[in-house]
Image: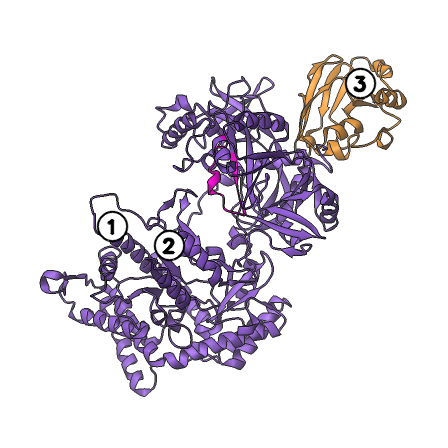
Amino acid sequence: MKELNELNLPEDLRYTEDHEWVRTESANVKIGIDDYAQDQLGDIVFVELPQVGDKFAKGDEFGTVESVKAVSELYMPIGGEIFAINENLEETPESVNSSPYDDGWMIEIKPDDPAKIESLMDKNAYLEMLKG
Amino acid sequence: MRVHKTGIVQEHLMTRKQSGLFDVSHMGRFVFRGKDAVPFLQYVLTNNSAALEIEESQYTIIPNERGGAIDDAYLYRFKEEEYLLVVNASNRQKDWNHFQSELKRFDDLEMTDRTMDIAMLSLQGPASKELLLGIIDSGYLPEPTRNSLGTITINNAEILIARTGYTGEPVCFELFIENKDALMIFDLLIEKGTVPIGLGARDTLRLEASLPLYGHELGEDPEGNEIPIFACGLSKFAVSSSPLKGNFIGKDPLVTQFEALKKIANRDYSQIENLPRLVRPVALTGKGLARAGFKVFRGDKHIGFVTSGTMVPFWEYQGEGIESDLTGKNGRRAICLALLDSNLIDGDKIQIEIRGKMTDAVIVPYHMRSEAPPAARAITYKMLRMEKKEIKESKVLEKVSHLTSKAMTNTIWRQQECINLIPSEQTMSPMTRLLSIQDPVGRYAEHKPVKAFSEADVFYYQGTDFIAEVEALLVNEFRKYLGCEEAETRIISGQMANTAVFSAMVDYINRTDRKIEQRRIRKVLNNHIIKGGHLSAQPMGALRDYVARDPKTEKPSVVNFPVHKDNPYKIDVEACKNIIVGHKPELIIFGKSMTLHHEPVAAIRSFINDQSIDCTIMYDMAHVLGLVGPYFQEPFKEGADLVTGSTHKTFFGTQRGVIGANFKETDARFELWEAIQRRAFPGSVSNHHLGTMLGLLLSAYEMNHFKDEYQKKVLSNAKIFAGALNECGLSVAGDPDISYTQTHQAILNVGYAKGPAIAKQLEANNIIVNYQAAPEEEGFTASGSLRMGAQEMTRFGMEKEDFQELAQLIHDVVANNKSVKDKVISFRKRFLEMKYCFSGDEYENIIQKLHDLI
């Protein structure tokens, strides 16, 4: 497994304590799991995602990601409505391992309050958290 | 140990395609010595420890008094006086304490925990054998059967090695190494190209193979109820019912469970309460993954729990059967093992509750098959439901034209364009063929000798005078040919000849008491199938219903001729003597289908006589029947009692069988001969195929007339052929000192598991051979040899120089991948006229008349 200094954590993203990442794309927000999470989970073989139109509050479980060894819940970093899901993950869940921030994105949401993104951790704060 | 090293999915796939190396040193290793070692192991384990010969191992279970499992384990006997038991790491202390508490009743027993002294590595996967062969300094890999053991040295390190594993791989090894050498061996194996595999992939591999894991499929279920040992499929092999085992912990409940299991297998659920649930492989057909502990339903009814489950990867294949090959692509599938109500059957649709949602699943018989070494093959639910190919209906004239034109094309191809080298085949002479389809081909002529008429044969049908004469003449020709007192020619195949003899043996053994259950043949000594023995003399073939079960091994009571380590094609006569003394076989069967040497009939006969062992010696001459004589072997002169054979391999005949016996009417065992006749008719045939019998008589005339010339030529051509293949640079099996062969066969080694593909490639070049597993290979799918015979092409006139030329053509295909089809076709054109048969003007006229009658 990767050492902390080996992790790929882009500067322009925000991160959560549950290891999700958040990226603003015009009015919407894309969400996935970060390099640390995919590395910890190992080979990801199944991703269960919500339906377009579903509404969630911050902290709600929106899906699960399963590796060979374990299942992990996915939590909403901020509240919002599902605008799109990454349907490719049904056939190629391993994209979450190989490309967690691009091909491996999970959901795109219309945030209830875009300003809430600013309350999430940036890269440095997230790394500090990981260091414990 | 880390859970995963390069990723579970990649590690799983690497193991299945190439090989994987597992450090399993964390498992517990206990050593037992002393006179009471076996009695103790018999008492605390479920399997029959006394069945283990040196260099054998077995899966076993440590039972509790209730018929549940304290642990499962593997018992190894590398050395005469030492038993090594490998137990699960997490149960090591529990197992040790349990054994300690049972030790008191056994005086002469020393139990030591050697877990910390010996490392244990597991090398699994199709490439693992070649990898090991490349680094062994001395010693031999264990015999190519599961659970066999051996000792090797690598870089001066002595390693105990077992053909065992926990992946389902058919090519599998576990290595026990002293600590000081362990890292060196690990590094060396990695350097040679294997990859380290973590515990995560170890778990997915064993799940795919449906192997149980303590704490999941053994121990307690998710509700805390004890899982009965017989709930696991492997228990049928791990729990012994041998009368030699005596009392052992949990015996009574295990007997009860086994009785229930037998009933459940017959869909009789009257004792289901003794075994309410069974561990079954389950494939998910809906989305999601099943994990241990999930509940399983059928409709509204809760029917059990998932015991292990996840998503596993698998390699995809394309093509059919033995020619199917990896596509390079892999898929993944959600599978699990589940402890389910025992009244469910394969194919039953069920639902698994995954975090509150129901997902569809189905009970399957297995997730994977290991019987086609060197690779294990994943079997998905979809593959289990392959539909049978529909044959399109067409008009009758089309069907007839298609059939006849293809038959003609096929005959031209095999008879005029191919070099036919299959050692069990022959072309009949034109006259033999024509005789085979004269009037008798549609007739019946059942008959038997009746004592009331002074042994006169009584026929049940009219119009049979001619065929009665044919049969009498045929018997006479075979008695002359084989050099024996009696011959039975009604048998229509070599396998049927063997079946009739085995059945007659049982009849004869029981002749003094017909009222009791008829006892089977107590012990048989034969050639192991992997050492060239033929199916028809194996328990899996004709011997099955006639040989007793050995209460010690709980297997058919058959022992095999030991062979020389450096020449596994040759029986080791000295070692064989110990086996004969130890086992006192009631029947010895010589003869093989992959055969390079004379069989040591005379040496074994003289030993049997010296030891006064009551034993029948039979030589199944199927392959070499046409070679009987001074240049090969004369089994009756050497002391055989019986000869069986098929009449169409090296012999010239139609496809039939024959039995010869050397008992005189005054001999005590003449009754065995009478039993053989009864088991021929009515035991094996009613109609004995009179057309081919007529043809066989002509070919027996041919053989008795031409045998001197033909036999010498076949045997010398085989030696020349083998030598020429070797000189081309190909690897020829056998002893160079005897020019590789004393039979009609030559055996070419083409590389582990490459036999089927190379045989196919030769076929594409019109050279017809057959692939065969060599004595060190795991099975026919792993064949690395080609078996060839000189008999048919010798009959078509091929001489020394021609076999040398043919060797070069074979080399061009095998070594250089050249296309030689056109060359082969023109080569064959030189050998279209059959020799060693009656020809010339006086016969041409006869052949024409026979032909006109058809």
Residue, disc 2: B585
Chain letter for the residue marked with disc 3 in the picture: A
Chain letter for the residue marked with disc 1 in the picture: B
Q: Is B90 on the left or on the right of B446, as rendered? A: right
- Disc 1 residue type? Asn
Image coords of residue B302 (percent x, y): 48, 18
Element at label 3: loop
Residue found 53% across the figure and 53% down from its top: B781
- Disc 2 residue type? Pro
The tint chain A carries is orange
Image quarter hosting the C terminus of chain A: top right
Element at label 1: loop
Q: Same chain for the residues at labels 3 and 1, yes or no?
A: no
Q: Residue at the bottom extreme?
A: B841
Q: Nearer the viewer, mark 3 or mark 1?
A: 1
CA distance for labels 2 and 1: 17 Å
Give residue A17's mark: 3
Q: Is A129 on the left or on the right of B557, as rendered? A: right
Image coords of residue B85 (percent x, y): 57, 36
Displayed quadrant of residue B805: bottom right
Q: Nearer the viewer, mark 2 or mark 1?
A: 2
Q: Residue at the front extreme?
A: B107
Q: Same chain for the residues at labels 2 and 3, yes or no?
A: no
- Disc 3 residue type? Glu
Image coords of residue B338 (percent x, y): 52, 27
Q: Which residues are magenta?
A: B44-60
Give residue B510's mark: 1
Vertical comparison of B817 with B614: above or below? below
